[in-house]
Image: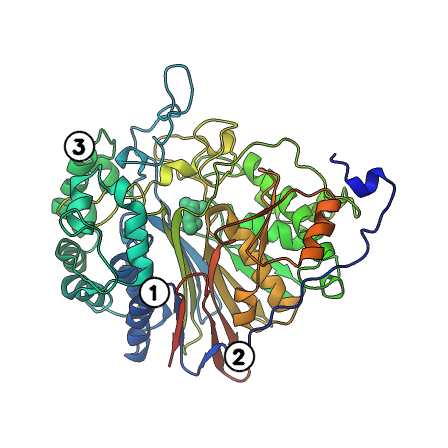
Amino acid sequence: MRRSLWCSIGISLALVALSASLHASWRKPVKARNGMVVAAESLAAQAGVDVLKSGGNAIDAAVAVGFALSVTFPEAGNIGGGGFMLIRLANGRSTMIDFREKAPAKASRTMYLDHAGNVIPGKSEYGPISAGVPGSVAGLLYALEKYGTMPRARVIEPAAALAEKGFVVSERFAAGLKESHREFSGFLSTIKTFTKNGVPYDVGDLFRQPDLARTLRLISEKGRDGFYAGDVAQKIVAEVRKSSGIISLEDLANYRPVERKPLLGSYRGYEIITASPPSGGGVVLLQMLNMLEPFDLKSKGHNSSQTIHLFVAAAQRAYADRSEFLGDPDFVAMPIEKLISKEYARLRIKSLDTVHGVASAKIHPGKGEFDRGQTTHFCVADKFGNVVAVTTTLNGLYGCKTVVGGAGFFLNNEMDDFAIKPGVPNMYGLLGAEANAIAPNKRMLSSMTPTILLKDGKPVLALGARGGSRIPTAVATIIMNVIDFGMNILDAVESPRIHHQWLPDTLVYETNGLAHDVAEHLRHMGYVLEQTTFTNGKAEALMIDPIAGFFYGGPDPREEGVALGY
Ligand code: DON
């Protein structure tokens, strides 16, 4: 246990609740009567709203947004990655479509280690050897066929048209391309597709993707066979082989999304529907909220040292459990029911030291900053009562940096989400054990946490985030901001967030995210504080007032999030 300075000199002022001033922006959330899309990029959000306006349901719109993001937000929106779609249908049923990538059949536990058993730096992050078998196309099409109402062409064509006609390069997009330029240079196909003859695109340039337009139209025409068989599949395998990758035609043909039961929990009278494994996000979220529920956070204050102390205590315990127990449910048995029970939370938080920060058992260094990754979350709600929350990812910025030559899309580098060696943190500083070891055809553990909340049986909140390991704490914070601190959805998303993930044992806060006296007090309690130069996740959320019949959008200003309704 770490001893704080104050403790050692016998002064205990920990019960003084120091508090950062309550964040309140004067902007109002976007409000709409008939439906809403909240996403990280406006052209893709528009594609979704257009679908809603023309009579489609939230699932149709979500699929349209998903495909459009692969064009307009190619650093994360994808057809070469994977994700989770959480659906709460108007008829009261909830389901989750797991389209997480899988390890290729030729994957092995030691594939990222050298002969001496050491991790080969970068091998699980760069190039097609770091890619899992993509799941996005299969997942989006499965959702459309089972729960949508529109033909494939109606939801894919807007994306294909955006790829063909092009769009104007924004500041965000130009910055991402510049940042990755050096890493693109290892792959001719990437240089060809994502640079102007080797020079990075500038803000204001028109960016066209004819290869991607062709791929999207093949998917539109042939369904999953337009991607997992034939020309595109052959191009994927050819590109992968150029760099000694191992994804085969059989891996692609065999890929299937899995429909799973979401996890169910509750927090102060709200029902929570959230992602189940192979995402660990929902487990961590429910564990944290269960541990926090017995405490009156409202009286302790928003972002006060006492509230943060409790939040960190809950996070340390939940993330420690994640590292030990969680993995792909098709491969490992997990004590999920126990982990997310109120009884377990009560026992787990019993060891809380109300005065001091408690050191996480061992300190392992993370790999620097964790926000180089790329994931994106979007939410859709329609006038029929359906709500969809989707988080999808390539893992790192532009995934493994390899564009499939002639097909126009990036492959993911999701294999790094496995525990590539026990005790070695992944790019988000997360540790894993046997449960998340690499095995052929296994899904790697995720932190993605698409979540929907109900009150009196009606959906009231849909949210999720990007940010790797910081996703579950971002989602937990926004839920607390709404329920405990009564914020509107915009304030709840915007307000500064803190993060802790057990190991590395640091309390990470955003720029200007903690009042000086709160930070000082936390240091005296024994915490190691670190101000991130990035963010604690980037979230997109929407709220529904079922009585007045309005939707409210909470896009995250940490990215160029937009809420569009009608
Ligand atoms: O599935 C996961 O947990 C990670 N691959 C997510 C990565 C991520 O959120 C990066 N975003 N900024």
> With 432 as the anchor, is 208 left or right in this view?
left
Task: Identify the residue under disc 1.
Answer: 41
Q: Pointer 2 and pointer 3: residues touching (CB < 8 Å)?
A: no
> Tag 1: residue type?
Glu
Q: Nearer the viewer, residue 359 or 271?
A: 359
Res 143 seen here: no
Task: Check disc 2: other Cα within 10 Å, few if <14, some if 14-19, many if 20+.
Answer: few
Gap in angstroms between the C-alphas marked 2 and 3: 54 Å
> Tag 3: residue type?
Lys
Q: Position of residue 144 (x, y in %)?
A: 30, 62
- Image quadrant where residue 119 sits: top left
Gap in angstroms between the C-alphas marked 2 and 1: 27 Å
Q: Secondary structure at mark 1?
A: loop
Q: Position of residue 544 (x, y in %)?
A: 51, 75
Q: Which mark is residue 546?
A: 2
Q: Is residue 439 above or below residue 29?
A: above
